[in-house]
Amino acid sequence: MRSGKRVYTADAVMLSTLHGAKGLEFPVVFLCGVSKGTLPLEAPGRPADLQEERRLFYVGMTRAIDELILLTNDDPSPFLSDIPVSCLAKGTAVELNRPQPAQQLHFF
Protein backbone atom coordinates (compact mmCIF):
# COMPACT_ATOMS: atom_id res chain seq x y z
CA MET A 1 0.00 0.00 0.00
CA ARG A 2 1.23 3.43 -0.86
CA SER A 3 0.04 7.01 -1.11
CA GLY A 4 -3.41 7.34 0.39
CA LYS A 5 -3.86 3.59 0.92
CA ARG A 6 -3.83 2.86 -2.81
CA VAL A 7 -2.83 -0.66 -3.76
CA TYR A 8 -0.59 -1.24 -6.75
CA THR A 9 -0.26 -4.57 -8.50
CA ALA A 10 3.13 -6.23 -8.93
CA ASP A 11 3.23 -5.35 -12.63
CA ALA A 12 3.04 -1.59 -12.01
CA VAL A 13 5.89 0.79 -12.76
CA MET A 14 6.60 3.67 -10.41
CA LEU A 15 8.48 6.75 -11.62
CA SER A 16 10.11 8.77 -8.89
CA THR A 17 12.87 11.20 -8.10
CA LEU A 18 15.73 10.06 -5.89
CA HIS A 19 14.36 12.24 -3.11
CA GLY A 20 10.88 10.76 -3.50
CA ALA A 21 12.20 7.20 -3.29
CA LYS A 22 13.66 7.59 0.20
CA GLY A 23 12.33 4.90 2.52
CA LEU A 24 10.85 2.79 -0.30
CA GLU A 25 12.09 -0.50 -1.76
CA PHE A 26 11.42 -2.25 -5.05
CA PRO A 27 12.41 -5.62 -6.55
CA VAL A 28 14.09 -3.91 -9.53
CA VAL A 29 15.31 -0.33 -9.73
CA PHE A 30 16.45 1.53 -12.85
CA LEU A 31 18.55 4.64 -12.21
CA CYS A 32 18.55 6.66 -15.41
CA GLY A 33 20.97 9.47 -16.15
CA VAL A 34 23.90 8.24 -14.07
CA SER A 35 26.08 10.56 -16.13
CA LYS A 36 28.54 13.37 -15.58
CA GLY A 37 26.65 16.64 -15.16
CA THR A 38 23.50 14.89 -13.99
CA LEU A 39 24.86 12.94 -11.02
CA PRO A 40 26.42 14.94 -9.44
CA LEU A 41 24.16 17.68 -10.74
CA GLU A 42 26.10 20.52 -12.31
CA ALA A 43 24.07 23.70 -12.68
CA PRO A 44 25.34 27.14 -13.69
CA GLY A 45 25.81 29.37 -10.65
CA ARG A 46 25.25 26.51 -8.23
CA PRO A 47 28.27 24.53 -7.09
CA ALA A 48 27.58 20.83 -6.58
CA ASP A 49 27.67 19.50 -3.02
CA LEU A 50 29.53 16.30 -3.86
CA GLN A 51 28.93 14.63 -0.51
CA GLU A 52 25.17 15.29 -0.65
CA GLU A 53 25.01 14.12 -4.28
CA ARG A 54 26.92 10.94 -3.35
CA ARG A 55 24.46 10.26 -0.50
CA LEU A 56 21.56 10.77 -2.90
CA PHE A 57 23.10 8.28 -5.35
CA TYR A 58 23.47 5.82 -2.46
CA VAL A 59 19.78 6.29 -1.59
CA GLY A 60 18.82 5.46 -5.17
CA MET A 61 21.01 2.36 -5.32
CA THR A 62 19.79 0.99 -2.00
CA ARG A 63 16.12 1.06 -3.07
CA ALA A 64 16.73 -2.13 -5.09
CA ILE A 65 15.97 -5.46 -3.42
CA ASP A 66 16.93 -7.90 -6.20
CA GLU A 67 18.38 -6.00 -9.15
CA LEU A 68 19.81 -2.53 -9.78
CA ILE A 69 20.24 -1.28 -13.33
CA LEU A 70 22.32 1.87 -13.82
CA LEU A 71 21.83 3.64 -17.15
CA THR A 72 24.44 6.08 -18.41
CA ASN A 73 25.85 7.51 -21.63
CA ASP A 74 29.36 7.85 -23.05
CA ASP A 75 30.30 10.21 -20.20
CA PRO A 76 29.38 8.28 -17.02
CA SER A 77 29.10 9.72 -13.53
CA PRO A 78 32.34 9.81 -11.55
CA PHE A 79 30.43 8.04 -8.76
CA LEU A 80 30.40 4.82 -10.81
CA SER A 81 34.14 4.42 -10.26
CA ASP A 82 33.41 3.91 -6.54
CA ILE A 83 31.50 0.68 -7.26
CA PRO A 84 33.70 -2.44 -7.25
CA VAL A 85 34.13 -3.82 -10.77
CA SER A 86 33.17 -7.28 -9.50
CA CYS A 87 29.68 -5.93 -8.72
CA LEU A 88 29.06 -4.60 -12.22
CA ALA A 89 28.00 -6.15 -15.51
CA LYS A 90 28.80 -3.55 -18.17
CA GLY A 91 27.38 -3.53 -21.64
CA THR A 92 24.83 -2.04 -23.95
CA ALA A 93 21.15 -2.76 -23.51
CA VAL A 94 21.33 -5.12 -26.49
CA GLU A 95 24.31 -7.02 -25.04
CA LEU A 96 22.67 -7.44 -21.64
CA ASN A 97 19.26 -8.36 -23.04
CA ARG A 98 17.93 -11.50 -21.42
CA PRO A 99 15.23 -13.25 -23.44
CA GLN A 100 11.94 -13.31 -21.58
CA PRO A 101 8.69 -14.96 -22.54
CA ALA A 102 6.38 -12.47 -24.22
CA GLN A 103 3.64 -11.05 -22.04
CA GLN A 104 1.03 -8.51 -23.06
CA LEU A 105 0.87 -5.66 -20.56
CA HIS A 106 -2.17 -3.44 -20.05
CA PHE A 107 -1.82 0.22 -19.15
CA PHE A 108 -5.43 0.74 -18.08
Image: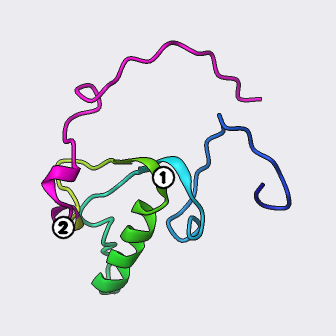
On screen, residue 75 versus residue 6, left or right, reads left
Amino acid marked by disc 2: Asp
SS at circle 2: helix
Residue 91 visible somewhere in the drawing: yes
Q: Is residue 43 visible?
A: no
At horizontal 55% and vertical 51% (from top left) the residue drawn is 26
Decide whether the magenta segment is chiefly helix, strand or loop. Answer: loop
Identify the colour scheme used. rainbow
- Which residue range is magenta in the image? 80-108
Does the magenta run of residues contain 21?
Answer: no
- Residue type at the position of mark 1: Ile
Q: Check the image and name the residue furthest to the top.
A: 102
Residue at x 34%, y 23% (from the top left corner): 98
Q: Which mark is residue 82?
A: 2
Tag 1, which secondary structure? strand
Mark found first going from the N terminus, 2 or 1: 1
Name the residue carrying label 1: 65
Nearest to the observer: residue 70 or residue 28: 28
Is residue 22 left or right of 93 when viewed as pictured?
right
Residue furthest right as drawn: 5
- The answer to if 82 sits in the magenta stretch is yes
